[in-house]
Amino acid sequence: ATGCLPGRHELQGNSLALLEGGRLVHHDAGHPDFLQHKRRLTGRALAMPTLAERLVAIGGMILFSNVSPGAAYAHDPDGFGHVYHRAGSYAPGRKRLEGARALTIGQDAEGEQLMTARFIGEALIERSPPLAILWLGEPDATQHLQPLGSARQLASLRQADANAERVIAAVDVLRNRGDDVLLITCSDHGHQTVSRVVDIEAELIAAGLKDSRESADVVTPTSGTATLIYVHPDRADRIAGIGAFLRSRDWVDRVIGPDELAAVGQAARHGLEFAISLKSDDQPNKFGIRGRSVEARPAAGKADHLGCGQHGGLARYEQMPFLMIEGRGFTAGTVTDVPTSPIDLAPTILAHLDQPATGMDGRALQVARAQ
């Protein structure tokens, strides 16, 4: 959405903490109101402009999404474009759309098909904005609930492929009528199989490094196979001990401490002191799919994903999403080993639209390939 790293746009993770009234408060960034809450608290939803804002002068953005509400709304929290989501759809100015104009679907195969059809008919063919985004909830939703390589997980892949095929066919129609389309087909992450679930909060309490489940001295928002650790400024005396404890655990692959956060694109705001990537290995699951990881016990009320798919950390397979680009500036049928990141997508889109990408951390992949 921004082409920037978390330390600059300020959305630190799928789960995070904010200092509110002198107290660390845990938040699920997937909640539909999270970014509006952050705006009320800090004065801004995101600290960097989104593509929706950057493109408003030339026709704007239309997004159809069936992922978490918070993730969808992060593409346009300030209401510059059109966002369609099952939890609520919005026109510019964050004017809520009702009735037939809203996106009333389930997070299931039928909902994905209906959303894809509307995206093609309304966004691509009829309205044709400079930027149109379709963010499918599958196969991610199923992979969190089913073993990787299982029949139901493979069926979700076929479903996603079928919806992508319909979009690709629609893009061919646009090109035949003369539109210069840059088609980007990608995933934002891969998956690991959860081999073990660890209650990090309980471990810190047992070690005397957090007062209790309810205490706000140390907060541990979990993001699947990773966790962020926040320490209240009044308990800075615990930081060194927490770091030493984490580095001694057999469920940790990497501890990124306060002095290293900037190197991974994070920033020590609101008491953030550590980012942890949990233990992983290259062993296969029962269906032969390689890559297993420890999962941090989810927040109360959420189920763990033992034996199923998860992501969030720095293990091999969760960092192996695919990226395919077709259009001007890219040679058909070629494969490149140039390292890429999701933050490269926004500047790549802006380069195609001949718009500046001022202030972005990513770079246009047209330029990267040329170099």
Image (cartoon, helix red, strand yellow):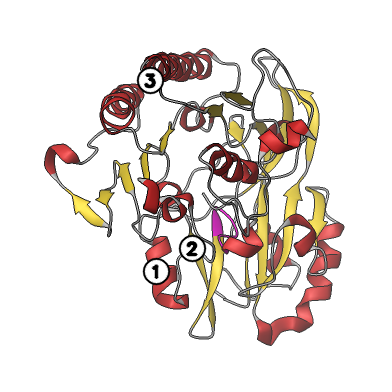
- The answer to whether the residues at label 2 and label 3 have Cβ atoms under 8 Å apart is no
Disc 1 versus disc 3: nearer the observer: 3
- At label 3, the amino acid type is Leu
Judge whether residue 131 can be spotted in this image.
Answer: yes
Residue 4, percent across and down? 62, 55
Residue 30, percent across and down? 44, 52
Residue labelled with disc 1: 37
Q: Tell me the magenta residue range.
A: 10-15
Q: CA distance from mark 1 to mark 3?
A: 39 Å
- The answer to whether the residues at label 1 and label 3 have Cβ atoms under 8 Å apart is no
Disc 1 versus disc 2: nearer the observer: 1
Residue labelled with disc 2: 27
- For the point 53% across and 33% down, the residue is 144
Q: Is residue 59 left or right of residue 310?
A: left
- Disc marking residue 13: none
Residue labelled with disc 3: 174
